[in-house]
Image (spheres, grey):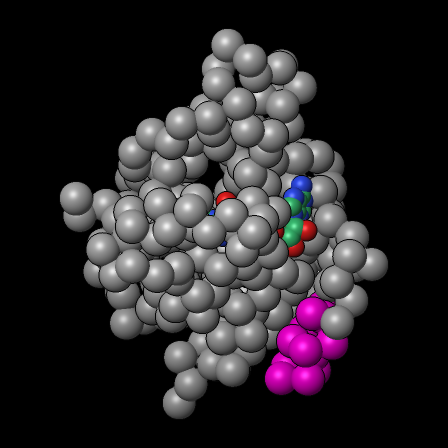
Amino acid sequence: MRKLENKTVFITGGLSGIGKACAIAAAKEGANIAIADRERGINIKAMEEIKAIQSKAIFIECNVSVYTQVEVAVQKVISIFGTLDVALNNAGIGGKPGKISEMDEQSWLKVIGIDLTGVFYCMKHELIQMEKQKKGVIVNMSSISGKVGYANSAHYVAAKHGLIGLTKTAALEYADSVRVNVICPGFIDTPLLNKLDLNNQPQRKQLILNKHPMNRLGTSEEIANGFIFLACDDSSFITGAALNIDGGYLAQ
Ligand SMILES: NC(=O)c1ccc[n+]([C@@H]2O[C@H](COP(=O)([O-])OP(=O)(O)OC[C@H]3O[C@@H](n4cnc5c(N)ncnc54)[C@H](O)[C@@H]3O)[C@@H](O)[C@H]2O)c1
């Protein structure tokens, strides 16, 4: 028996990087997949790859920072599949870097709007449904930046710390029926990280690698392995946990 056979798995930001790897892993475990992402046009090939594994996979255009779009997206999942068994609130952006005194209000609001408020919107609508079902699993995507500071990224760090608090609170509120956990990845080789253009800055890349005792970047598949564990019954007594998948970054 596969670990997510016939479960409905809703993944935000599932057309790229970590979200896409989680969608592929869940599809291989037998899940029906609903991807919510900004625009299909950005990465139509990703949806084709997921559909090649699970023909029932669907795409919903949704900006997670817009309340009504999230509400409609969750409703759509339920109207198509009938249930919402697992939600992965993964969509996120890095934001424009800068010290706090130099950070403009718009950059702050944009990152908080997607990375923190967007997850609240998703959790709210997912939990309305999971309360009705009296069961469900939620996994949020924080970061090592949810547990320690990172210079020049106050918006991102604040949002990712906030996600751990949201996760713990939801775990307490719904402990009788819904498990809620959060993953804290180290630096993972994805299109988001590519925006840092590290391959053209070998010294900066080495500094980042040095912060990981394993001296390498993680892969999206390594995060997906953690997601599947938290999503399925293998983690049936785990709720409110923040799982580091970080090559030892936070052990220091
Ligand atoms: N890559 C890393 O090193 C790393 C480390 C720690 C945490 N994370 C977190 O993992 C998550 C995924 O990151 P990734 O590296 O795979 O990034 P990515 O850029 O490859 O993928 C992010 C996805 O989210 C979508 N997205 C962005 N804003 C959205 C919005 N407003 N509404 C809906 N979809 C939106 C994008 O279209 C994209 O498909 C993010 O929350 C990120 O903060 C990444």
**Residue at position x 60%, y 74% in the image:** 32
Give the position of the C terminus as an image quadrant.
Answer: top left
| Residue for point 36% across, 37% down | 146
> Compared to 169, does 5 lie above or below?
below
Q: Residue 149, position in %: x, y?
A: 33, 29
Q: Is 129 on the left-hand or right-hand side of 68?
A: left
**Residue 187 magenta-drawn?**
no
Q: Is residue 248 left or right of residue 185?
A: left
Q: Residue at x 75, y 72 (%)?
A: 45
**Looking at the image, which residue sits at the far top?**
101
Residue 128, x across and y down, in percent: 53, 44
State the residue lying farthest toward the bottom.
1
Residue 52 on the magenta segment: yes
The magenta stretch spans which residues? 46-58
Question: Looking at the picture, does residue 208 appear above or below residue 161?
Answer: below
Q: Residue 59: which quarter of the image? A: bottom right
Rendering coords of residue 251 (x, y %): 17, 48
Residue at image location 62% in from the left, 15% down from the top: 104
Is residue 224 among what the camera can see? no
The percent position of residue 4, horizontal first and vertical second, equals: 45, 76
The secondary structure that dominates the magenta segment is helix
Decide which of 67, 94 is in the foreground and name it: 94
Seen in the image, is 191 located left or right of residue 86?
Answer: right
Image quadrant in which you'd find residue 188: bottom left
Question: Does the rendering let one see residue 172?
Answer: yes
- Asked where in the image residue 228 lies, by quadrant, the reply is bottom left
User: Where does the N terminus fall, quadrant-wise?
Assistant: bottom left
Please name whichever residue, 31 or 25, is drawn nearer the observer in this view of the structure.
Answer: 25
Which residue is nearer to you in this view: 119 or 126?
119
